[in-house]
Image (tube, rainbow, N blue to C red):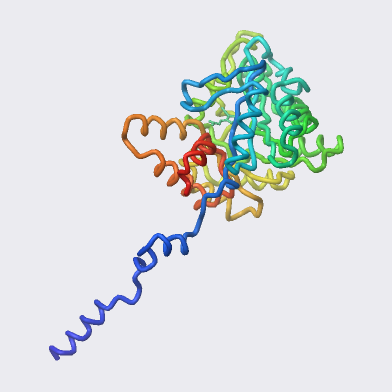
């Protein structure tokens, strides 16, 4: 009796399944790694300002600068040399060029339009040129759409905003964008942009929809960089103030079913790629969107997420290379095919991603 118990006990100790076997060497770990980070998985964001010779540091985003078109070209060349295949461009205007209708948004001479033409001429089809399509950097009130007075105060006029957004998307497409990326969160913008592009014969210009974009506190440094913080002022016409946040158009962080609805709508409307934004606080959303769509999925590792890592690294609280790699891997593991990150060029230049 005693002997039998001993045998059973021994068998229990004989572990058949030992997950540690596959962790025993770097080569074994590499062999069995489920996700990778390759330069092609990264999309580098750039802020573009008017003028020449401009390289403006951004206090809220250490290591990131705003460039005029001439200086941008050097940066794009370096990005290409690092293996980057896609960039997303954001225009930044002085307040003197902003107005209630975002008049400069569809100007063929806007900084973004000029950057597109210059980049296409310099790099041909080697670099995928994506542009952010949104009015917030172009309106004097900093909202992503145009405002209209209503009985309940100033409000975003969804359908009037669509007209300005489609004009902006077409201006970018005509200047050479491969992909336009509407980030405004107006209803129906993907369909409206698709229709407008097709009418102009721009049928091969793609749409990367910021389909699932939350009203997030993590956009703070971006708004400082782009001068796009929403204001109550100067477009108020009747004394009623506009909201100073984006909660009437960006998504409520309490929701996840709504993310699936937004993603499905944008896919139906003709989006070619979908985005989830921000990344880290919404990895559950990434997993869910991945499971309902066959479209390529892009994650935006946003400005606040970058700034947090930079601040923690500067404070000596964590090791930046490993923390950045782990963060980007987590986003890939959740299902993102590619990641927009302010770390894209730095991480590759420093060899952090292996
Ligand atoms: C424009 C836009 C924003 C971001 C990308 N496009 C700001 C916002 O919605 O307020 C944020 C990106 C970031 O934080 O890095 N609407």
Q: Out of 9 and 328, give the one closest to the viewer.
A: 328
> Would you say residue 338 is visible in this rendering?
yes
In the image, 162 versus 295, the foreground residue is 295
Closer to us: 271 or 124: 124
In which quadrant is the N terminus drawn? Answer: bottom left
Which quarter of the figure has residue 155?
A: top right
Q: Where is ligand 1, by quadrant?
A: top right
Residue 254 in percent (x, y) is at 48, 39
The residue at 78%/30% (across/down) is 175
* Residue 309, placed above or below residue 236: below
Picture quadrant of residue 238? top right
Query: Could you tell whether 18 is left or right of 282 in the image?
Result: left
Give the residue displayed 47% in from the left and 39% down from the top: 350
Residue 250 spot, x, y in % from top left: 58, 32
Left or right, 27 with respect to 215, comes to left
Q: Position of residue 53 (x, y in %)?
A: 62, 17
Residue 252 visible from this viewpoint = no
At x 38%, y 30%, the residue is 311
Q: Residue 85, position in %: x, y? A: 64, 43
96 relative to 156, above or below = above
- Seen at 60% across and 12% down, the residue is 240
């Amino acid at each position: 009796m005693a002997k039998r118990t001993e045998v059973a006990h021994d068998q229990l100790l004989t572990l058949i399944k030992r997950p540690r076997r596959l962790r025993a060497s770097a080569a074994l770990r590499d062999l069995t790694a489920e996700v990778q980070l390759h330069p092609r998985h990264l999309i580098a964001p750039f802020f573009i300002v008017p003028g020449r010779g401009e390289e403006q540091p951004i206090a809220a985003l250490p290591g990131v600068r705003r460039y005029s078109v001439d200086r941008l070209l050097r940066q794009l060349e370096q990005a290409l040399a690092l293996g980057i295949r896609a960039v997303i461009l954001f225009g930044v205007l002085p307040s003197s060029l902003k107005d209630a209708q975002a008049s400069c948004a569809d100007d063929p001479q806007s900084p973004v339009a000029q950057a597109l033409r210059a980049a296409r001429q310099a790099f041909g089809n080697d670099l995928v040129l994506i542009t952010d399509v949104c009015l917030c950097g172009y309106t004097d009130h900093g909202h992503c759409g145009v405002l209209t007075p209503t009985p309940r105060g100033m409000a975003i006029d969804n359908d009037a905003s669509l007209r300005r957004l489609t004009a902006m998307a077409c201006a970018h497409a005509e200047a050479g964008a491969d992909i336009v990326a509407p980030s405004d969160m107006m209803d129906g913008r993907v369909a409206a942009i698709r229709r407008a592009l097709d009418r102009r014969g721009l049928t091969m210009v793609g749409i990367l929809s910021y389909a699932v974009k939350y009203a997030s506190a993590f956009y703070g440094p971006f708004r400082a960089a782009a001068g796009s913080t929403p204001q109550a002022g100067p477009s108020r016409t009747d004394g009623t103030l506009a909201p100073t946040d984006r909660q009437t158009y960006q998504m409520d962080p309490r929701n996840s079913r709504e993310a699936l609805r937004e993603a499905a709508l944008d896919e139906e409307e003709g989006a070619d790629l979908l985005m989830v934004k921000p990344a880290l606080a919404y990895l559950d959303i990434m997993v869910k969107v991945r499971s309902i769509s066959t479209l390529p999925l892009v994650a935006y590792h946003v400005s606040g997420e970058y700034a947090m890592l930079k601040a923690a690294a500067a404070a000596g609280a964590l090791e930046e290379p490993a923390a950045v790699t782990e963060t980007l891997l987590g986003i890939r593991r959740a299902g993102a095919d590619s990641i927009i990150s302010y770390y894209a060029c730095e991480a590759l230049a420093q060899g952090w991603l292996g």
